[in-house]
């Protein structure tokens, strides 16, 4: 019978909890806290699991979901052990240190027997976060998968025994039958799956860190329903502090605290930097109205809206004409007002990012400056001067876009190089932050073709980077690529045929992951001209976890689309497209699409725009807004979302 054997559930008596067990909820997930005072109380005979046979399986998987606390550097804690009553030796066990995991087993093939320890180094569990581990054992091969990341494989000289007796043995949760080494974190799942590698059964969910095969009823997401006025059968504890009144600050000190906004009838949770809505009266988007006409230095190729903590909300405009350059606006009294002007060379886009306490703003310059030099510039926020100052210049080639991201604690900055002279098939570059020099240094080059945009995103433990390739010198019908981070560099993951791709936008709806491409025009020098180069489908792709690839979900007719922007109002999800040219005029409606479930995205609002280049959604205490930039007139607009 190769059913999953739920070790954790077996330790929970029917109708209650074992002595030394408490239920806590952290980060929305429940787990057991185990007491160190009575370790034997957290055990049960192995015969309750091994009913028909008193031998431990020769091949198996162990699935564990836990939240380990940060502890002393040399401390070892046991997740579970299997021990014979009259012996202090561990037949089978799992323990961890702050940076490694040990699997223990007893081999009885020689006289007296001996214990073997299989060590998995560089496994960081003690970070106060939930993690799911899958340990697969077969003979001399041991494989550990943490949060569905790349498996760590170890081959040892001593194989796991083919016939390990569990007669008179007992399982112990979080200890080895004594107080030393007791597990101090939270344990949610502990399952033994005989005869199979459980990784495929676990790693089909989007939230890998808390993926489950079997958990005790008391820990499941929906609490047991009380009978009439009876109290909950399984009470659980959680630390909660609720603040009333005006909007309080949200910093690391207030993390995990709640704030109730009486005027909005909403409950919010502090994540350490912003208040996240947990429960509120949901608004619905009724219509969109013009809120502010913003006269700009010149035509605007892109806009970046960002917040500098304790300073305010800003919008950086990428203006086309070199003098006077590009302007930064600050949100003041409910409007954007000029704040700072920065010299740029036909700027295409801005990217705001932080590294530690440092605040940066990078501009992608498309042309040479007045001295014939071609580079893009990273600016750093000066708290003393309260403005951005030049920090680092990087040589680029008709740069279109910057993308900033962090992988495994390291900061990266990727630039899209569009062309060098008339050659569109050139390398774009990924730079890595060097903490020692305080500068970005070239780390990897990726061949691109007239590229317009980078889009970085993560799915579970994996990091991805998508490039929008636009033109290869003869055609816009070319492949754009999605890369995955493996072994310290980006490697090709998937190629998707696009038509003058100008933008990728990744977004989530529930557990589903989508990727939308903005196709700008269809041109091929070797093919007959279409009736309209610019009326062309843009596509939305959805991640198929089973196939491990993005598959087409929906086509939407667009007119030289240059940008997608995803945003939400209440429980509703929306996509707005930047339609820039229909083949006859730049005065084209851009469309807001509403998510309609099985119908996909359906047109909901038509917004008059002129040469629309970029959309940004942002929120303030006064409401929600859309900001669009025009690449054909020195006028951008802020639109307010009116809700009911």
Image (spheres, grey):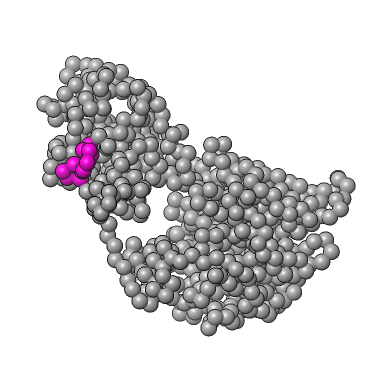
Q: Quadrant of the C terminus?
A: bottom right
Residue at image x 72%, y 62%? 579
Residue at image x 88%, y 47%? 528
The answer to which image quadrant residue 215 occupies is top left
Q: Nearer the viewer, residue 288 or 34?
A: 288
Up-down: is 86 above or below 79?
A: above
Q: Quadrant of the N terminus?
A: top left
**Residue 219 on the magenta span:** no
Q: Would you say 410 lies left or right of 586 here?
A: left
In magenta, the rendered stretch is 11-21
Does residue 353 appear in this view?
Answer: no
Q: Would you say 112 lies left or right of 620 here?
A: left
Residue 592 drawn at (x, y percent): 65, 62
The answer to which image quadrant residue 379 occupies is bottom right
Residue 47 drawn at (x, y percent): 21, 25
Residue 610 drawn at (x, y percent): 74, 70
Residue at image x 18%, y 16%? 111
Q: Nearer the viewer, residue 217 or 4?
A: 217
The answer to which image quadrant residue 625 occupies is bottom right
Residue 160 drawn at (x, y percent): 31, 23
Among all residues in the image, which is located at the extreme right?
Answer: 528
Predominant SS along the magenta part? loop
- Count the marks: 0
Up-down: is 439 above or below 55?
A: below
Up-down: is 596 above or below 162?
A: below
Q: Would you say 510 lies left or right of 402 here?
A: left
Residue at image x 67%, y 74%? 636
Up-down: is 178 above or below 86?
A: below
Q: Nearer the viewer, residue 616 or 279?
A: 279
Does residue 604 appear in this view?
Answer: yes
Among all residues in the image, which is located at the extreme left?
Answer: 86
């Amino acid at each position: 019978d190769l059913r999953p054997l739920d070790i954790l559930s077996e330790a929970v008596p029917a109708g209650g909890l074992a002595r030394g067990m408490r239920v806590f909820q952290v980060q929305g997930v429940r787990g057991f806290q185990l007491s160190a005072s009575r370790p034997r109380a957290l055990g049960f005979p192995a015969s309750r699991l091994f009913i028909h046979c008193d031998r431990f399986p020769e091949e198996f998987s162990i699935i564990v979901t836990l939240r380990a606390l940060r502890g002393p550097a040399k401390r070892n804690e046991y997740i579970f052990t299997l021990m014979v009553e009259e012996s202090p030796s561990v037949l089978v066990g799992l323990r961890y240190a702050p940076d490694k995991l040990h699997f223990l087993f007893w081999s009885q093939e020689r006289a007296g027997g001996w214990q073997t320890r299989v060590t998995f180094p560089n496994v960081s569990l003690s970070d106060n976060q939930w993690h799911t581990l899958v340990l697969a054992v077969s003979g001399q091969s041991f494989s550990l998968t943490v949060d569905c990341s790349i498996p760590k494989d170890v081959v040892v000289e001593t194989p796991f025994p083919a016939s390990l007796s569990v007669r008179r043995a007992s399982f112990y949760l979080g200890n080895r039958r004594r107080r030393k080494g007791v597990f101090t974190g939270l344990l949610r799942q502990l399952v033994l799956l005989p005869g199979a590698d459980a990784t495929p059964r676990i790693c089909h969910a989007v939230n890998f860190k808390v993926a489950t095969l079997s958990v005790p009823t008391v820990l499941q997401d929906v609490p047991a329903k009380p009978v009439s006025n009876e109290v909950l059968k399984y009470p659980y504890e959680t630390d909660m502090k609720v603040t009333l009144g005006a909007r309080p600050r949200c910093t690391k000190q207030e993390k995990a605290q709640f704030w109730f906004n009486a005027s909005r009838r909403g409950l919010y949770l502090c994540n350490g930097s912003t208040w996240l809505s947990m429960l509120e009266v949901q608004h619905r988007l009724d219509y969109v109205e013009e809120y502010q006409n913003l006269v700009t230095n010149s035509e605007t190729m892109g806009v970046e809206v960002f917040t500098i903590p304790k300073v305010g909300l800003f919008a950086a405009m990428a203006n086309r004409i070199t003098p006077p350059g590009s302007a930064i606006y600050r949100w003041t009294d409910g409007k954007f007002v000029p704040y700072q002007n920065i010299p740029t060379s036909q700027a295409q886009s801005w990217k705001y990012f932080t590294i530690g306490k440092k605040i940066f703003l990078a501009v992608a310059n498309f042309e040479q400056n007045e001295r014939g030099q071609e580079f893009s510039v990273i600016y750093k926020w000066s708290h003393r001067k309260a403005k951005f100052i030049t920090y680092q210049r990087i040589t680029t080639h008709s740069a279109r876009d910057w993308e900033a991201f962090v992988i495994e604690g390291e900061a990266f900055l990727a630039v899209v190089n569009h062309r060098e002279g008339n050659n569109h098939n050139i390398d774009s570059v990924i730079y890595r932050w060097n903490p020692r020099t305080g500068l970005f240094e070239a780390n990897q080059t990726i061949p691109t073709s007239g590229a317009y945009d980078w889009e970085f995103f993560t799915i579970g433990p994996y990091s991805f980077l998508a490039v929008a390739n636009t033109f290869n010198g003869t055609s816009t019908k070319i492949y754009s690529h999605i890369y995955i981070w493996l072994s310290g560099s980006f490697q090709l993951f998937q190629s998707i045929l696009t038509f003058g791709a100008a933008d990728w936008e990744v977004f989530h709806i529930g557990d589903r992951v989508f990727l939308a491409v903005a196709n700008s025009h269809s041109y091929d020098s070797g093919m007959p001209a279409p009736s309209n180069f610019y009326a062309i489908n843009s596509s939305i792709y959805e991640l198929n976890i089973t196939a491990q690839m993005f598959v087409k979900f929906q086509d939407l007719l667009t007119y030289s689309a240059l940008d997608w922007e995803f945003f939400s109002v209440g429980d509703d999800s929306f996509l707005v497209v930047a339609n820039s040219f229909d083949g006859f005029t730049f005065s084209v409606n851009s469309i807001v699409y509403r998510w309609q479930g099985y119908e996909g995205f359906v047109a909901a609002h038509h917004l008059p725009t002129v040469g629309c280049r970029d959309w940004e959604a942002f929120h303030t205490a006064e409401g929600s807004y859309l900001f669009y930039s025009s690449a054909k007139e020195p006028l951008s607009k802020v639109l307010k979302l009116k809700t009911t």
